[in-house]
């Protein structure tokens, strides 16, 4: 499904964030990325959809190598990848429903297309997603009126509205309290399991990763130092 081959990233500053990372994520697998701050977790997630440009290597999504695509084709292929962010990246002045629908249109084209009418099936799907994340009663509320946990639920629904084949999740609970973090992690992993949707979750909280992830990959100084099931993780990576 996703195959990363010898991925490397050296920033212009000379910092090497990833060195020769190879990783395969099969359909339906929920993989947690752990490792100390600066290990390269965020860079790895961002290189997959080229929010950060890799220096070398390949990222195969099915039989498409995302790394070699031109801008227009990259934009099209990115629709296959859902993103969930630490700070939610919601449009604060829009409603919950509008934020979810924005996932359907794609982040870039959203403003241009906003005044267009949405097809009824998009609206229906958005309501179904809001129901699934427990926010049906909040559809008309503005995003800036929600709690952190509710915002992240919107973030999840928005990513799913785009009907992705892969989810990239960057520290989804870093701004949330421990109880809300567990609720969000449970919701996220249940939804992925229901849909057979593979996910890579950058998760700095090791106990949380052990509780919810099927597979854990540990990074240190840009290299993979652990790859296995949570129960095989005996020491801090
Ligand atoms: P993590 O997500 O595990 O904390 P990052 O991927 O953010 O790690 O960072 C990995 C390394 O790359 C660190 O040394 C960091 O300083 C460096 N780095 C990250 N982003 C940039 C950037 N935009 N420019 C230069 N160096 C960066
Ligand atoms: P950066 O500031 O790191 O260069 P960008 O300019 O690419 O990031 O993106 C600006 C904002 O939009 C950020 O908050 C980022 O998280 C968010 N963003 C970028 N790409 C997407 C996407 N495909 N879907 C949703 N939000 C996105």
Image: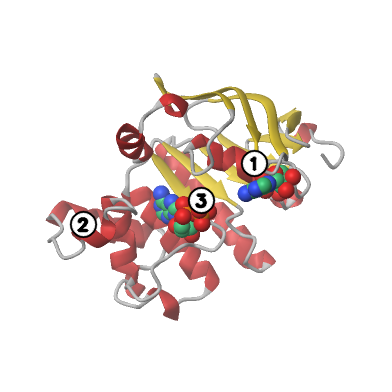
Residue ID at (54%, 63%) = 87
Question: Element at badge 3?
Answer: helix
Compared to 213, does 67 lie above or below? above
Label 2 and label 3: CA atoms lie apart by 21 Å
Asked which quadrant contains residue 93, the reply is: bottom left
Kindly give the residue lying farthest to the bottom in the view shown.
145
Which residue: 34% across, 69% down?
96
Seen in the picture, residue 167 relative to 182 is either above or below; the reply is above
Q: Quadrant of the C terminus?
A: top right
Q: Is residue 28 visible?
A: yes
Q: How is the image coloured?
A: secondary structure
Q: Earlier in the sequence, mark 2 or mark 3?
A: 2
For disc 1, the neighbor class at 10 Å (few under 14, some 14 to 19, many from 20) is few
Choose mark 2 or mark 1, whichever is in front.
Answer: 1
Q: Are marks 3 and 1 in contact (CB under 8 Å)?
A: no
Judge by depth and name the residue closer to the eye, 5 or 169: 5
CB of mark 1 near ligand 1 (< 8 Å): yes
Indicate the position of residue 140 as horizontal and vertical percent values: 29, 76
Residue 211 appears in the rendering: no
Residue 134: image x %, image y %? 41, 65
The residue to which callout 3 is attached is 188
Which residue in the protein does label 2 denote? 124
Q: CA distance from mark 2 to mark 1?
A: 45 Å
**Disc on the earlier residue, 2 or 1:** 1
Image coordinates for residue 107, horizontal then vertical, percent: 34, 54
């Amino acid at each position: 499904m996703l195959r990363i081959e010898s991925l490397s990233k050296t920033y212009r500053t000379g910092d090497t964030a990833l060195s020769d990372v190879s990783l395969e994520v099969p359909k339906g697998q929920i993989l947690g990325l752990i490792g100390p701050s600066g290990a390269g977790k965020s860079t790895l997630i961002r290189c997959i959809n080229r929010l950060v440009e890799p220096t070398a290597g390949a990222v195969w999504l099915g039989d498409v190598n995302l790394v070699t695509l031109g801008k227009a084709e990259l934009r099209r292929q990115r629709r296959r990848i859902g993103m969930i962010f630490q700070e939610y990246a919601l449009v604060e002045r829009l409603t919950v429903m509008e934020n979810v629908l924005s996932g359907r249109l794609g982040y870039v084209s959203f403003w241009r297309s906003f005044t267009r009418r949405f097809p009824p099936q998009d609206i229906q799907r958005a309501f179904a997603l809001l129901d699934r994340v427990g926010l049906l009663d909040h559809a008309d509320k503005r995003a800036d009126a929600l709690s952190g946990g509710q915002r992240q639920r919107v973030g999840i629904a928005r990513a799913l509205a785009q009907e992705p084949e892969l989810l990239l999740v960057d520290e989804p609970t870093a701004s949330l309290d421990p109880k809300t973090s567990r609720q969000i992690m449970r919701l996220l992993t249940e939804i992925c399991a229901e849909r057979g949707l593979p996910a890579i979750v950058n998760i700095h909280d090791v106990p949380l990763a052990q509780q919810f992830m099927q597979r854990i990959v540990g990074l240190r100084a840009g290299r993979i130092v652990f790859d296995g099931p949570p129960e095989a993780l005996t020491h801090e990576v």
